[in-house]
Image: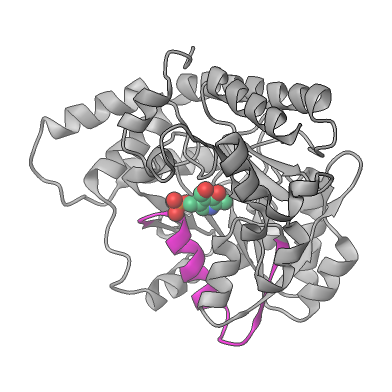
């Protein structure tokens, strides 16, 4: 597959937020949207459904539920009961709903920073206290600070996990998952596990869900959706699930009347993705792996002062640019001098920890390779 016939003019024309927020000429590498057209089997299913223009109140989503249950079995989750699956308008509403139901105002909620911003926003917007445990930068990868996490969990009832982790691109391995589960048991925690990026892995290993261990199933709610792997963010659907259907019921109760129902087209889309999207996904992940490798090599050869651990998953590169004199205002520098728009490091932490991530950027590399090369060349030229 090649995505290389698509240029900036085509992408801007799509009227996406990603391509229209900044002026023409800027390469947008910020929001997590891919510059690749949606998979043909998904488009075919959507067309087919639109040609039957009637009955758009969805039924009970039984087909989608069955497809998801089959997928969960491949992630070590065994049987997730249908009553344990609840559909959402997106994954973020699930994060908010879970924090809201599983903690009380003023209580501490633990997460590992840097982290996808709606994690800390959900905690603070709902009047809870973020306890952010910074990940450790080791010579080979980002790792969990186990002592700090243990201490943080001692004072909390809820742990929010991002697995795979946005923005560092880590896929927590079996040993790390084992330790995380021990902590959840030791401190009697609820775990909210966001596994949205699970299908965008470069590790070659099967994905192990946090709740793959039966001992933590009753205390875990997982959120997922098709929007990252299948590039369907605008179609809006997600799901939260737990083996413990009472937990899902409890979360749903706190948002009764607020979630609406998923649109018929989003259900059609997710079903088609799960049923027929596999080959497209495999090719797209290969293409993304190539982009990741290109960044790794480019940085090594041309911008060796940038620190980067090649990501194991996601199409987001977390770059440490603190060695550059421009690090203090790196976002504006890259926008003004390189005409490249990125997400600024401090976005990925709550107020207290924002200074830790000044000089880091998150760069979305899900774009045709010539555009990626252009962006990297521009950055290298601007940084001298
Ligand atoms: C970890 C994670 N969770 C949730 C979302 C957003 O999901 P949604 O658009 O379905 O709310 C993103 C988007 O980038 C993400 O990276």
Over which residues does the magenta segment extend?
A: 88-112
Magenta stretch encompasses residue 93: yes
Quarter in which the C terminus is drawn: top right
Q: Residue at x 73, y 61 (%)?
A: 112
Q: Residue at x 63, y 28 (%)?
A: 378
Q: Is residue 364 left or right of residue 114?
A: left
Magenta stretch encompasses residue 301: no
Compared with residue 187, is residue 81 higher up or lower down, i.e. above or below? Answer: above
The one nearer the camera, 164 or 220, is: 164
Q: Quadrant of residue 194?
A: bottom right
Q: Is residue 127 left or right of residue 22?
A: right
The one nearer the camera, 361 or 323, is: 323
Q: Quadrant of residue 90?
A: bottom left
Percent position of residue 363, x then y: 62, 39
Q: Is residue 5 left or right of residue 324?
A: left
Quick check: can you spot residue 281?
Answer: yes
Quick check: can you spot residue 165?
Answer: no
The one nearer the camera, 233 or 219, is: 233
Colour theme: one colour
Q: Is residue 99 left or right of residue 226?
A: right
Q: How many marks?
A: 0
Percent position of residue 178, x then y: 80, 53
Percent position of residue 266, x then y: 30, 43
Percent position of residue 69, x then y: 47, 44
Compared with residue 216, is residue 5 higher up or lower down, i.e. above or below? Answer: above
Compared with residue 190, is residue 129 higher up or lower down, i.e. above or below? Answer: below
Q: Residue furthest bottom?
A: 106
Q: Residue at x 38, y 46 (%)?
A: 65
């Amino acid at each position: 597959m090649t995505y290389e016939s698509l240029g900036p003019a085509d992408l801007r024309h799509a009227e996406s937020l990603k391509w229209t927020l900044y002026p023409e000429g800027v390469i947008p590498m910020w929001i997590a949207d891919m510059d690749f057209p949606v998979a043909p089997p998904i488009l075919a299913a959507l067309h087919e459904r639109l040609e039957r223009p009637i009955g758009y109140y969805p039924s009970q989503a039984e087909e989608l539920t069955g497809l998801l249950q089959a997928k969960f079995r491949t992630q070590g989750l065994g049987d997730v009961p249908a009553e344990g699956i609840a559909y959402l308008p997106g994954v973020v509403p699930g994060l908010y709903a879970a924090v809201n139901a599983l903690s009380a105002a003023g209580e501490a909620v633990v997460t590992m920073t840097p982290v996808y911003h709606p994690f800390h926003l959900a905690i603070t917007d709902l009047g809870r206290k973020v306890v952010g445990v910074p990940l450790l930068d080791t010579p080979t990868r980002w790792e969990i600070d186990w002592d700090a996490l243990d201490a943080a969990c001692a004072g909390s009832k809820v742990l929010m996990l991002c697995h795979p982790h946005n923005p560092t691109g880590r896929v927590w391995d079996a040993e790390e998952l084992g330790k995380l589960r021990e902590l959840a048991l030791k401190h009697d925690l609820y775990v909210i596990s966001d596994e949205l990026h699970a299908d965008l892995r470069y590790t070659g290993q099967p994905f192990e869900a946090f709740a793959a261990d039966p001992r933590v199933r009753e205390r875990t709610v997982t959120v997922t959706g098709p929007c990252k792997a299948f590039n369907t963010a605008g179609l809006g659907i997600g799901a939260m699930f737990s083996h413990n259907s009472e937990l899902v019921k409890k979360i749903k109760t706190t948002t009764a009347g607020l979630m609406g129902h998923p649109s018929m087209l989003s259900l059609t889309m997710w079903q088609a993705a799960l049923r027929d999207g596999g080959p497209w996904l495999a090719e797209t992940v290969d293409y993304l792996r190539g982009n990741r490798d290109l960044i790794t090599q480019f940085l090594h050869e041309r911008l060796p002062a940038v620190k980067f651990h090649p990501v194991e998953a996601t199409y987001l590169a977390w770059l440490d640019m603190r060695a550059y004199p421009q690090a203090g205002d790196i976002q504006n520098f890259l926008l003004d001098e390189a005409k490249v728009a990125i997400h600024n490091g401090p976005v990925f932490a709550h107020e207290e920890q924002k200074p830790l991530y000044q000089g880091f950027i998150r760069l979305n590399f899900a774009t045709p390779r010539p555009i990626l090369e252009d962006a990297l060349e521009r950055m290298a030229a601007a940084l001298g």
